[in-house]
Amino acid sequence: MDIVIKNLCKSFGEKQVLKNINAVIKQGQITCLMGQSGVGKTTLLNIMMGFVKADSGEILNIPQLKSAVFQENRLCESFSVLSNIKMANDSLSDDVIMKHLAAVGLENEAKHKVSTLSGGMKRRVALVRAILAEKEILFLDEPFKGLDDKTLEQVQNYLSENTKGVTVVMVTHQIEDAQALGAEIINLKNSAL
């Protein structure tokens, strides 16, 4: 079922971040939340994930089984890349994980500690982990930050290939990211006015 957002409002103290947001997020598609900094994109994600409570309004039909890439990578730095991914889904074989790592150019990093990786490599590990987790919905908050142009295209292709039929809600500042993924766009700037 599609996710329906009705008259959603959220303030932090005197600052109203979301005002009467109404939107439909289609099941099985990628939807990008866009808008300038401060319009509430991450706040809306956090409400949908259940981390923040809205002041008023409602969101209907959010699946129970969620996976996410946050603004921070939230990886265990002292664990290997493989161990980080298995934390999200311990039923995965090493072979399956290795195929996914190869798809994002990290096949040679599987046994390295995350602490030894560059920022862009850590971002790719976080994305692979979120994609391989059991889920009905995937939340992505600026999933491509820190990636160079060549890696960006590779990771966008990986994301497109591995989220077919999955509901994906992504925050981005880049219209090109949304276009590359063929995503629906919800512009929060327009919704909040």
Image (cartoon, rainbow, N blue to C red):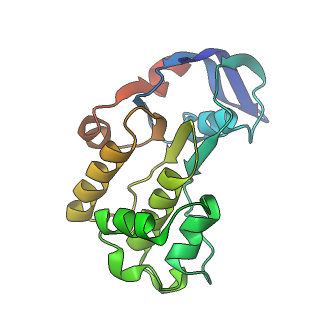
- Percent across and percent down for residue 28 are 44, 27
Q: Quarter-wise, where is residue 181 in the image?
A: top left
Task: Please tell me which residue lies in front, 14 or 105.
Answer: 105
Query: Residue extending furthest left?
Result: 150
| Residue at left offset 51%, top offset 74% | 82
Q: Quarter of the image for the N terminus: give it.
A: top right
- Percent across and percent down for residue 186 are 43, 24
Viewed as shown, does residue 121 lie left or right of 178?
Answer: right
Residue 95 vertical placement versus 43 (above, below): below
Residue 143, visible in the rendered structure: yes
| Residue at left offset 61%, top offset 59% | 88
Residue 38, visible in the rendered structure: no
Task: Please tell me which residue lies in front, 72 or 76.
Answer: 76
Q: Quarter-wise, where is residue 55 in the image?
A: top right
**Image mark count:** 0
Residue 173 vertical placement versus 64 (above, below): below
- Percent across and percent down for residue 41 are 54, 36
Task: Please tell me which residue lies in front, 65 or 117.
Answer: 65
- Percent across and percent down for residue 193 are 53, 17
| Residue at left offset 71%, top offset 17% | 58
Residue 148 vertical placement versus 177 (above, below): below
Task: Please tell me which residue lies in front, 124 or 177.
Answer: 124
